[in-house]
Image (spheres, grey):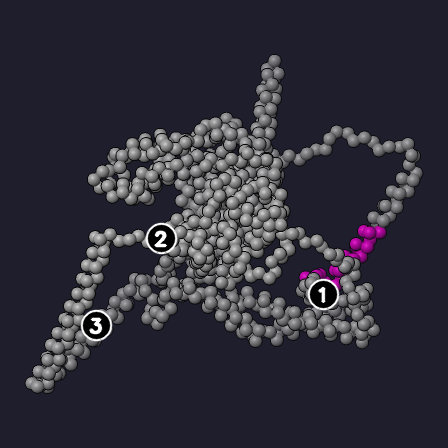
Amino acid sequence: MSQALIPQDILICCSHDKPLTASPCSHQNSTYSYQNYQVSSITAPGNGDGLSTYIKMWADTQRELDTMLQREREEFLQPQEDREKVMKMLATAYVQYLEIFQKLEEAHDHLIHQQKRAAVRQVLDGVMGRILEIKKEMVALENSECHSMDGILMELQRVPEDIEIPIPKYFIKENLGILQDREKYLHEILLNAGLLEQEPVTAMTLEEGIKVIQVAERARQGRARAAFMKRIYLEEKRQSKKEEQETGKSPDDAATCIQKVWRGHRQRKKTEKLREEEMIFLGMSLPPDLEAMSSLQKENVLQCEVQEREDFSFRHELRRTEGPHIKETLQDQITQCFLECRHITGRFPDYPPEKTGGSKAIFIEKHPEQVLEELAAKKAEAERKEKEKNGKKDKETVKKPSEKKPPKVGKQVVDESWKMGPSNFLLMLEEGSSQYQVFWENRDNRLDFLQDHDPELIKGEEREEVEEEIRVQVDEVMQQKLLRVKQAVDGETGPQGKAGKDKGEKTPGKKKIPELERDLTPDRTIESLYQELAEEGLLIQVKNVNLSDYIGYYDCLRSILRETGAQPMPSIPEVRQLVALYGILPLGSQTVHENAPLVKSLLLAGPAGVGKKMLVHAICTETGANLFNLTPSSTGKYPGRDGLIMMLHMILKVNFKRLAKVLPLFLRALKPKDRVLLVGTSSRPFDANLGPFCKVYQKIILIPKPDYLTRFALWKHYILQRGGALTRLVNLNCLAQVSDGFTQGHVVDVVHAVLTELRLLQMARKPLRTAEFVTSLARHEPVYKEEEETFQAWYAKTPLGKAWSTAQAAKEEEKEKGKKGKGKGKK
């Protein structure tokens, strides 16, 4: 197994509850979860139809994005005093960017043209990053992860489902083969280590054995009879041919036979041609001369290889045709620049070193005369500052010793106005917009009938690489040439003011490398570390669940509670959004992870059974990440601090008390380029020391128990999924009502306990009844109100919870002041 089979995006699950154990995938019908990943089928476009829908969608979405960028320039760059107005502005932009995100993702998924996909991909990543930046501003403004969006949705005529976070399909599609191979490799490791339970082999009953023998015997008899009938047919055919040869035929009969065969052949060809012309006219197939290139799915498989070959051929052609001209132009420009510098300064300049860009630095810099003007201005400014400094010193010497500085009057004015922070993605979005306007907006898409690459666009991209390659070669030649000219003309033997090193360059001292950044296993291969982590139970197999499988609906009562000043708790759809924003999008896109507000750690807290570990597996499924388990049972296999350091090092190269001192070091060692996310799950976070706990986890998501609508949907979904039949005897409304206080895990356990294999067989003559589920549900312990209040009280002590309470107290104080002011005015 090569290193390419082990992607570097990692999700680390640090559970503070019952440990996750290595278990087989939840899907039993398929061996590997990613092998059944459905790639959307794409049909060939016909006469400008087909994919034109998605090209039009891309065009419309690009115009919407341009409008949003213009709005950001006008509104977001201006300081705002009214916080409510700012929040409305941010929430509106958040919803509109989400709509753009959904359309771009759909267009990117269905477009085939690779250069178009690359253009859409750049804008798609930029929109994802911008959404995360706006979300950060909203959280900082309201001191809460949950926001009241009802008014914005009504104003924009949207429904809550419109702000669901879509998961880009390219997260998995682009690495599908690698993920399948990796999962197969992990499955073999776990199977050989005895960590996977093989399907038990049960003995057949007598009736089952008889049925198997009967099927085999009937098949044998069928094959024997078919062979016997074939022999009879061949014998009859030989006999008829023999009779024809004996009797013979007249010339008229032979001519008629030939005419029948020929006319039939000619008519079949004519009919086939008419059918092909009709299909081409309807746009359902390609012309015959292009039929060999009509298999778009095959083109999808080979398009990367084709693009690489085309890129290489274009690069080779550019190097052959334009290389000499580029080389000559660069040499002339560098020579001219050096001559002008010597004419102005009296000496040839030193050649810029390669670490500063080489000759590229020369072309970036200004004209030599402008450089001299700037140097003169800087020198004059330095002399002026020196004079001012000397004048101040003279005044200080004249000043009496008893004189003191006048005391400061009043306090510094604090600017409380809001202004949008700097963005790492607006420039990316503007570049994508300008690229679309230049290359794609007015393009005739009929030229892309075969979804082939545009040679001119490829040449434009490859020309930069060719110029850079030639520039490096020219720098080597021109540097030696400059040294010879300087020695011959000015008598200089080397760079002036340098003695082997650049001026001002210091010898770097030995930098202490942290323990987690040292290579503690230099003689180990990635495969051996991967295997050890899997065998020790640290690397576990991901269950094939999607984020959309976490069922839940919006709770309208939460917005009412929010108006009373209560701490806002997320609903289940909001939990899905937060997991997607902080977990899935950054892990799935390297660009987003490197430039968006970095979230290194995430805590999922809530009562037992609300689906915390399911969300962890959903993050891995949607992004293709490796899942490492840091529960006490697994980390206990690496005793001591050195053992923990080695374990975390192994995780990076491919119980909380023990990790409390090491995990902050681990998180500090993570860089934006490392697509690693630490996810903790806990059903009793209030038992931990809150200070270290909040230092480790940047984001805390409190997961609630399901509300009425969600419980109704859960009962229906899991009963049907298990194979049960819903009749009038099963009252889902009653089940949703009596299960108040119970979690998703309770519902799943009850459905599995009731719908056994025997009960499913009896269902035809004995339909399901509501009482069966109620009786089984009564054996479980619900989540009581006191436990919910404990979670809410604990969350109120977290940094974000404290900030919310402080903000609410400030608002109440302002209201009281306002009331008192009105009372005094009336008097």
Q: Camera-side residue: 456 or 710?
A: 710
User: Residue beneath label 3, please?
Assistant: 268
Q: On the picture, is 483 further left or further right than 306? A: right
Q: Residues within 10 Å of mark 1 (few under 14, many from 20)?
A: few
Q: Is residue 373 inside the magenta stretch?
A: yes
User: Residue beneath label 1, please?
Assistant: 353
Residue 136: quadrant of the picture? top right
Count of marks placed on residues: 3
Residue 133: quadrant of the picture? top right
Q: On the picture, is 295 further left or further right than 507? A: left
- In terms of secondary structure, where does tag 3 sit? helix
The residue sitting at 64% across, 73% down in the picture is: 327
Q: Gap in Å between the C-alphas at discs 3 and 2?
A: 55 Å
Mark closer to the chain start, 2 or 1: 2
Q: On the picture, is 719 further left or further right than 798? A: left
The residue sitting at 36% across, 62% down in the picture is: 44
Residue type at tag 2: Glu
User: Residue beneath label 2, please?
Assistant: 199
- In this view, which residue lies farthest toward the top? 827
Mark closer to the chain start, 3 or 2: 2
Q: Which residues are magenta?
A: 364-383
The residue sitting at 44% across, 54% down in the picture is: 194
Mark closer to the chain start, 1 or 3: 3
The residue sitting at 78% across, 31% down in the picture is: 408
Mark closer to the observer (3, 2):
2
Report the quarter where the C terminus lies: top right
Q: Position of residue 681 (x, y in %)?
A: 50, 41
Measured along the vertical axis of the image, is residue 522 above or below residue 233? Answer: above
- In terms of secondary structure, where does tag 1 sit? loop
Q: Residues within 10 Å of mark 2 (few under 14, many from 20)?
A: few
Residue type at tag 3: Arg
Q: Camera-side residue: 198 or 694?
A: 198
